[in-house]
Amino acid sequence: MLSWRLFKDLRSYYRGCRGRDLREFYDLESGLPYFDSVSRILGLHKRRILLSWIEAAPWQGPILDLGSGIGTLARQLARRGHEVAAVDLSPAKVDKGRRLTARHGARRPLPLHHLLGDLRELGGGAGLDQEILRAFGWKAMRPFEVIIAADVLEHVPDPPQATVQRLRRQLSPRGRLFASVPSRLCLNDPGHLWKLLPGEWEEVFREAGFKIQRRKMSRICWYGLPTPLPLAMVYELRRDILESA
């Protein structure tokens, strides 16, 4: 039987995030029983795609993982030896991520920094930029070669094209942006501010100066196996050569 507090929290969560303080909303999300674990389990196929594509080409410098939540993908990358800055808006998710990373890196510390910040601060010279600079020093003073925005673009209040252009400005000329956006099945999540279909996001990417290198629909996983149910379209994006000139 649900407790009254849990019932109120669930009711509050399913009211959605529009018009609310986003940090409080995602703190609430992370506090709901099993929410972060369910996200980790269902998104296994999506992370497999991202890991495979990210490691398909060499790069230099740290990875910037935006909207990283509790850092599930960031820890997988760090365990493979990659330096990662995992950024999230929610203090609760960042704290939980730090605890999990400390536990996984008890014998050998992982090259992973969990940073509290809003991606809308990127490029402003303060706030998140300063946190990244403190984490990586001189390596953070140049553009990133790999940025991840998995299941985050639809959560950002700014117009989608402005958000994608902001990320593009943080990439090196040959940098890669790895993004995922909801399938039609998952469009109405309470945290989604922008309910665009993958085809509509592709128009946003092109208008923001990106070329779609490849795309693949990820599937909802259950007990480690992908089901036929679509979860999110995964993209590898590169700065368009003409736009970069």
Image (cartoon, grey):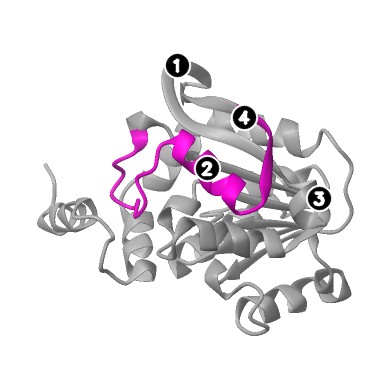
Tag nearer the camera, 4 or 3 = 4
Q: Residues within 10 Å of mark 4 (few under 14, many from 20)?
A: some
Question: CA gap, disc 4 to disc 3?
Answer: 23 Å
Q: Is residue 48 magenta?
A: no
Q: Is residue 188 magenta?
A: yes
Q: Mark 2 highlights which residue?
A: 203
Question: CA gap, disc 3 to disc 1?
Answer: 30 Å
Question: CA gap, disc 2 to disc 3?
Answer: 31 Å
Q: Mark 3 highlights which residue?
A: 82
One can see residue 136 in this view: yes
Q: Residue shown at 80%/37% (left/top)?
A: 55
Q: Residues within 10 Å of mark 3 (few under 14, many from 20)?
A: some
Span colored in magenta:
186-215
Residue 227 badge: 1
In the image: residue 96, left or right of residue 173: left
Tag nearer the camera, 4 or 2 = 2
Residue 54's quadrant in the figure? top right
Image quarter hosting the C terminus? bottom right
Taking depth in this image into account, of 198 and 71 the one nearest to the observer is 198
